[in-house]
Amino acid sequence: MSHIHEEINKIRIIDGHEHIDPKEIRKKNKVDFFGLLHYLESDLITAGMKRGILSPESKLSDEEKAEQFLSFFQKTKNTTYARTFITALEDLYGMDDWTVKGILALNKKVIAATNDDKWYMKVLKEKSGIDLAITLAFTTNVDFSLFRPVMFLDYAFKLRTIKDVQIIESHSGKKVHTFQDYLHAVDALLDKFVREGMVATKLGHAYWRTLASTKPTFNEAEQCFNRLVSSFLDEQLSQQESIPLQDYLIHHIIQCSIEHDLPIQIHTGHHETSVSGNGNLITNSKVTDLVPLIAAYPDANFVLLHCGIPYHQEYLTIAKNYPNVYADFTWVYIISPTIAKQILHQMIEMVPQHKIFGFGGDYNFVEGTYAHQKLARKIVGDVLVEKVQDGMLTEIEAVEFAKRIFRDNLIEFYKLKV
């Protein structure tokens, strides 16, 4: 192991993006071995496994689930999702028996961990070397010794029926009769989240529509809103009909984020099959479609997640040219270590180092985050060793770069107290 790798392994990471539920929710959901699959489930599905067959709602017994898992795991164990899964279970649970019997024994260990109040602290702080993780768990009620919340705002602009409006009305505590009332309700919702500790807003609309946004007028959005609230509960606006309303609200949320000095995290690029259901088009995630929004709001801070894969070349140019765009490696290393290395090599050459965030596990469970950070540290170390060998960086500069992207940049950017 090189000196650079050794120094990187000492860094206490600030994790820029996760989906880890509070441990109380994990306990309530009775998470077991099959509940830890997350990204691997996507590969199992694309290998032909029936969607949902390993879920808690499945009628299969645990033994039958283990048999189903192993039959498709053999087809997918070459992928990084699978290798990361193996690393997590071998390192954290001592798993060494990939048979039905072995999985059933492991299942008991995972259930015990789910019920262990110290498990999160052990895995994140002690095993992973993560001091703090920014997590999107659809709640601000998180353990602030481990997490900071980011909140998903899609539901504030993905309006199709009057029920969607009523949800915002309920969550914000504001009565909505007019479109202006609705804007006030969205403002109140963000105010509430900020008081509760939210450190960023999140837009994930690339999963269900294009990232491209027009700039409709208030009147155009209001007309759409009035059609929506005038309908019966079971009547739905089409996606095409609701675009003026959605786009206006996207602008409004960005403006509110600026007012609160909140960064805006945006999903770009690759989709997870187990979430999208293969029902979305990857072309909806083109990072170049965000350029008009980026240019329109120079005082906003946009964190473009996932390096835009497979549109990472355009992503690099955008991150290089726009002062208000920050590059984020969340999810990237487990999508493809090869692509991650290529992007990092280019990013070192192109993007100011203070604008690069080096790690976000993007997992639902701490086990995945552990294995992902282990891989990320190795990949970043490999790339930096090559940069030193090529004479582009000194060893001191390489270690300084690693400390910045894994820790210092995120503390400064998100104004974290660690």
Image: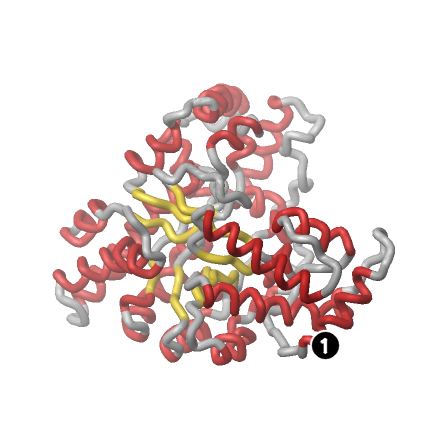
Vertical side of 340 occupied by 287: above or below = below
Relative image position of residue 99 (x, y in whole percent): 51, 25
Relative image position of residue 324 (x, y in whole percent): 40, 73
Q: What residue does disc 1 label?
A: 219
Q: In which quarter of the image is residue 68?
A: top right
Q: Quadrant of residue 179?
A: bottom right
The reply, left or right, for residue 388 in relation to residue 41 is left
Relative image position of residue 381 (x, y in whole percent): 25, 55
Whether residue 36 appears in this view of the structure is yes
The reply, left or right, for residue 195 in relation to residue 171 is left
Residue at 14% x, 51% y: name it. Answer: 3
Foreground pick, 303 / 340 = 303
Residue at 50% x, 62% y: name it. Answer: 266
Relative image position of residue 55 (x, y in whole percent): 64, 33
| Number of marks in the rendered image | 1
Q: What residue type is labelled 1?
A: Asn
Residue at 37% x, 30% y: name it. Answer: 92
Question: Callout 1: helix, strand or loop?
Answer: helix
What is the crowding at mark 1: few (fewer than 14 residues within 10 Å), some, or many (at least 20)? Answer: few
Whether residue 336 appears in this view of the structure is no
Vertical side of 166 occupied by 280: above or below = below
Residue at 48% x, 80% y: name it. Answer: 295
The reply, left or right, for residue 369 in relation to residue 217 is left
